[in-house]
Amino acid sequence: MSDLIRKDASELAGLVSSGEVSAVEVAQAHLDRIAAVDGEVHAFLHVDTEGALVSAAAVDAKVKAGDKLSVLAGVPLGLKDILATNGLPTTCGSRILDGWIPPYDATVVTKLREAGVVILGKTNMDEFAMGSSTEHSAFGPTHNPWDLERIPGGSGGGSSACVSSFEAPLAIGTDTGGSIRQPAAVTGSVGVKPTYGGVSRYGIVALASSLDQAGPCARNVLDTALLHSVIAGHDPMDATSINAPVPDVVAAAKRADIKGMKVGIVKELGGEGYQAGVRSRFEESVALIESLGAEVVEVSCPSFPAALAAYYLILPSEASSNLAKFDGIRFGNRVGDDGSKSVEQVMSETRAAGFGSEVIRRIILGTYALSAGYYDAYYGQAQKVRTLIKQDFDAAFAKVDVLISPTAPTTAFKIGEKLDDPLAMYLNDVATIPVNMAGLPGMSLPIGLAPEDNLPVGLQIIAPAMADDRLYNVGAAIERELLAKWGGPILGMAPELAGA
Amino acid sequence: MSGISQEDVAHLARLAHIDIPADQLGHYAKQLDAILNAVAEVSSLDTANVAAMSHPVPMTNVFREDIPGVSLTAEQALSGAPAVEDERFRVPRILDEE
């Protein structure tokens, strides 16, 4: 297997732009890796071999012509299958969209193409991004490269697994309640959910429009920052896009200096319910942060214990509305249209056949929460709790520069373990959900392996809105110390995949 | 807060246009009942003087310049449709026979 697959994105971009290695060679090395190991990992739903080689060749032509290249030109990437791609299938992990080929690109995809990033294919996900394990994909689960019997997180498990199995140095995820950060945590990779409105949602199939945000996944902080800088920025096609300069995340990742910063530990996100090895690695990183000259204090966010409950009312409510468009009329599959049935019957049969059980559960839950007579007690009350969560964050950020917590309460669990217990599954996102509720940026960074199971643990870093650069500064400072301690990247400790 | 019965699930499924088989209604009712019990925790906080928040950023209407732009062609718009006739989406009948 080519050494190119183990190189960082920034390094690959340098090799391509200097002409030392061609973008086609880089793309081919990753396509070969996918061919060798994706049978075991199943990170990809669709591999676009031809498209990847064509866009790589276009980068090589620019190198030859001496044209100026973007920071990630020629670097391969896996794209979560929830972003619309012109001419490439987009399924959202659902039967109802099996075979659908969008006629346009999401803004994030347009930006990637313009930057010469080589899209290798579409990555697996929980159906319509509902889940924390990628087991709810209609096309079968993705496996965690650290232990193929375990989940890679979700909903963006394909994106985290393709990065951590060296199938791609970069991936795009989307994060509604933790779907970038929790997969990063359980696979030993880095993932960032940018500030809500920081990255365009145009062309991303909506789960919960007030919570969804696309973001970068990579194997280190600098690569994550480079990808963030490529996809972020104002987009007139998204009414919630923030019209302000993108924070300089790349400079922050290079600064990596937290001396004098104030870091808050969120009291409510830790302790009971968190695995022992997650807690011990978290405590070590607190000591590390202090040793780098930052002051660490505990802060309390008293409404956070109700965040999970509020989220599981707001998300299903928005999702039940957003997913109404999948009715087998304008796109996707249609079932039962034999000429004898009414449009309602055909829609009902189409949706029953096209949606998996978790999607049906959440649509029914959302329909209930929005019903006359229940609206105030459920959806209305959840929106008030959302205000309290935001107020807790505002009060915390009046005292500290960033907040930290474990990203997820446990390391990767076994495939099948929580599949029939939706409530147990929902608890995976207990630490990540409050961040989406307030629209803040959050990062997950690997901080070691839990001693009891030798599986990766993630640290969550949270910053105020539009202060995404702080995540990268803090993350890079911690990463530098940990790399020195480990003698190399954490993914070097992962077992070799048999296909390799 | 109230629990959720099989009949409730059947009613909600009709509203949501999902034809859930009768033998699965009980399973969904049981799971949804457990979820509703858990999310009832939203009532544990005092929100008497708290305003509801629908969105993390202030929502104001965004206008674009009123300039004609490129949009999808009919062929593109229909490219993913399950049934097409005469450059239009073909749909099942929308009126009852009577």
Image: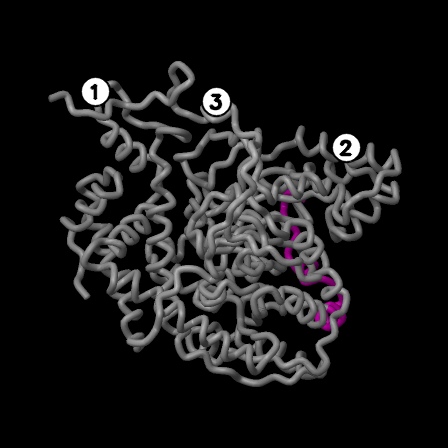
**A389 or A355: nearer the viewer:** A389
Q: Position of residue A115 (x, y in %)?
A: 72, 43
The magenta region covers A480-500
Mark 1 crowdedness (10 Å alpha carbons): few <14, some 14-19, many ≥20: few
Residue hosting label 3: B74
Quarter of the rendering occupied by the N terminus of chain A:
top right
Task: Report the Cα–Cα distance between label 1 and label 2.
Answer: 52 Å
Residue A72 visible:
yes
Amino acid type for the residue under numbered disc 3: Ala
Disc 2 element: helix
Disc 2 and disc 3 in contact, CB within 8 angstroms: no
Q: Position of residue A427 (x, y in %)?
A: 40, 64
> What residue lies at 61% left-to-right and 84% top-to-bottom?
A296
Q: Is residue A133 magenta?
A: no
Q: Position of residue A268 (x, y in %)?
A: 45, 78
Disc 1 element: loop
Residue A151 visible:
no
Residue hosting label 1: A340
> What residue lies at 63% left-to-right and 52% top-to-bottom?
A233
User: Looking at the picture, does residue B17 appear above or below residue A486?
Assistant: above
